[in-house]
Image (cartoon, coloured by chain):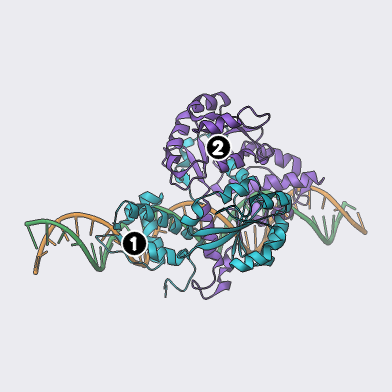
Chain colours: A purple, B cyan, C green, D orange
DNA sequence: GAAAAATCGTGTCATATTTCACATAGTAGG
DNA sequence: CCTACTATGTGAAATATGACACGATTTTTC
């Protein structure tokens, strides 16, 4: 039967579960103890029905007339999402974007720890490693060793387009299984490796298309079927 | 009738069209003159059928037995996507992420021009404005004026979570219609404004979930239905 | 303790998106 | 000019995703 342990959670549902976790965190900080699907929906930007459907998928049961116990639900979400403890993440590319990511304070709060960065330019790693509290930047040659040491599975790619594929090959070789790719190229990866692309240009082009009401479609109000806010 | 001019192109199709444009650009640089749906599909990471369906949506007709003429198709894509000329984009938040974005060389190549940046910290704008060729950084108070001057419709939000909603309100007030949001908050916007969210933590959590094969699902191969590479 | 209100869980329906399959049209070669 | 081959365009089936509605269960109130 449809037990919650015997099948993967759909693609987009995982996203929403993360959203819920964040919303719950905020609610918890405000002193709430239970939450209704209605409230959680509002806080996450989705519909109440969707919240209930998603939450039943992970097998957590709320109580009619009362709602969901926040603490328990949050714990359950962390279990399912695997964010119970800090997960190590490594970064390749210590250029401007890479350094911006290193300085991002949200990693730990969200259950991840940026444990190491890599670059091929000696100026980058000699300049930044060793600073107190900051992320150490190693030469790319040390990749395998450091990945193994931290047992990292996730990697962020923030290198120029030219070297992206080469870097990814090395990441996979080193044992990385999931890649967050900021470079604007189509990465070739074997079965079993997951890639999420964040492509500035694609985002902007899409935004541009959907905000341009002249020249494309006569009816602006035709967009009623599409939500203004997108969460993938 | 299903004419290509009388209806909007679906959400995800716009994304793929952008992908095609990039792939075509590369093919063109290699000296190719025509391309088959098969080849274009391979270069873009989608299926050939999908390519044909998408391309018929914009009303461009390929030639059986030969394929699509690259130059002509690329021009048509730029028309449809509205990337025929440079579109102005403004940025709010000149912190680390903001400065990384300002230094991103890809904007112009992809049809966008980062015309101005804003910050509320005098240190940021006094330090960076006026440099030759770089993006000027203005105080946030000048937002309306500068947005109007450049006739910008698109804005990028790279400010801390606390100030994101406030910034977005000002953007909308100033005439911005599409927002690329890097802050991890749910933005409230009126009908007609499009928001695309880029949320590091959500991306990582999803990656983590889908690369974690223990503890969640017995069958790893169960993921046959999901593509390893994701383009939204 | 009984009735009313609140809220969950889920079957069913509607919509959007992708895949399949194939008839159709154009090209190349002799 | 005719045949063989290639590649498109598109209707239809399959899949995924989200919306709706309603019965069931618990709390709250009197």
**Quarter of image, res B140:** bottom right
- Report crowding for label 1: few under 14, some 14 to 19, many 20 or more residues within 10 A (C-alpha): some
Q: Quadrant of the N terminus of chain A?
A: top right
Q: Is residue B214 visible?
A: no
**Same chain, marks 2 and 1?**
no
Viewer-nearest of discs 2 and 1? 2
Tell me where residue B226 appears, x and y as whole percent: 47, 45
Does A212 appear above or below A25?
Answer: below
**Quarter of image, res A213:** bottom right
Q: Is residue A176 visible?
A: yes
Tell me where residue A59 appears, x and y as whole percent: 64, 42
Q: Residue under mark 1: which chain is it in?
A: B
Q: Which residue is mark 1?
A: B71
Does B168 appear above or below A136?
Answer: below
Tell me where residue A67 appears, x and y as whole percent: 75, 49
Q: Residue under mark 2: which chain is it in?
A: A
For residue A68, side relative to residue A151 (left or right): right
Does B12 appear above or below D25?
Answer: below
- The residue lying at 38 percent from left, 68 percent from top is B59
Label for residue B133?
A: none
For residue A95, side relative to residue A172 (left or right): right
For residue B192, side relative to residue A34 (left or right): left
Q: Nearer the viewer, residue A78 or A22?
A: A22
Q: Which residue is mark 2?
A: A94
Q: Secondary structure at mark 2?
A: loop
Q: Nearer the viewer, residue B53 or B213?
A: B53
Q: Nearer the viewer, residue A61 or A231?
A: A231
Q: CA distance from mark 2 to mark 1?
A: 37 Å
Q: Secondary structure at mark 1?
A: helix
Q: How many marks?
A: 2
Tell me whether the residue at label 2 lies in contact with that at label 1, contact meaning CB atoms closer than 8 angstroms: no
Q: Nearer the viewer, residue B169 or B210?
A: B169
């Amino acid at each position: 039967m449809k037990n919650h342990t015997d099948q993967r959670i759909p693609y987009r549902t995982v996203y929403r579960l993360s959203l819920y976790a964040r919303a719950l965190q905020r609610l918890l900080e405000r002193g709430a103890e239970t939450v209704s699907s209605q409230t959680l929906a509002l806080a996450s930007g989705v519909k109440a029905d969707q919240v209930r459907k998603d939450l039943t998928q992970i097998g957590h049961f709320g109580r009619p007339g009362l709602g969901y116990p926040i603490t328990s639900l949050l714990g359950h979400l962390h279990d399912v999402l695997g964010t119970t403890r800090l997960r190590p993440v490594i970064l390749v590319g210590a250029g401007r974007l890479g350094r911006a990511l290193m300085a991002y304070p949200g990693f730990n709060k969200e259950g991840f720890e940026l444990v190491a960065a890599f670059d091929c330019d000696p100026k980058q790693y000699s300049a930044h490693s060793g600073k107190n509290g900051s992320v150490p930047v190693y030469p790319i040659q040390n990749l395998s060793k450091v990945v193994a040491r931290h047992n990292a599975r996730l990697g962020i790619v923030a290198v120029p387009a030219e070297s992206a594929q080469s870097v990814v090959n090395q990441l996979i070789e080193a044992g990385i299984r999931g890649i967050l790719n900021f470079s604007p190229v189509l990465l070739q990866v074997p079965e079993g490796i997951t890639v999420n692309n964040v492509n500035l240009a694609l985002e902007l082009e899409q935004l541009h298309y959907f905000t341009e009401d002249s020249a494309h479609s006569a009816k602006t109000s035709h967009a009623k079927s599409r939500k203004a806010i997108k969460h993938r």
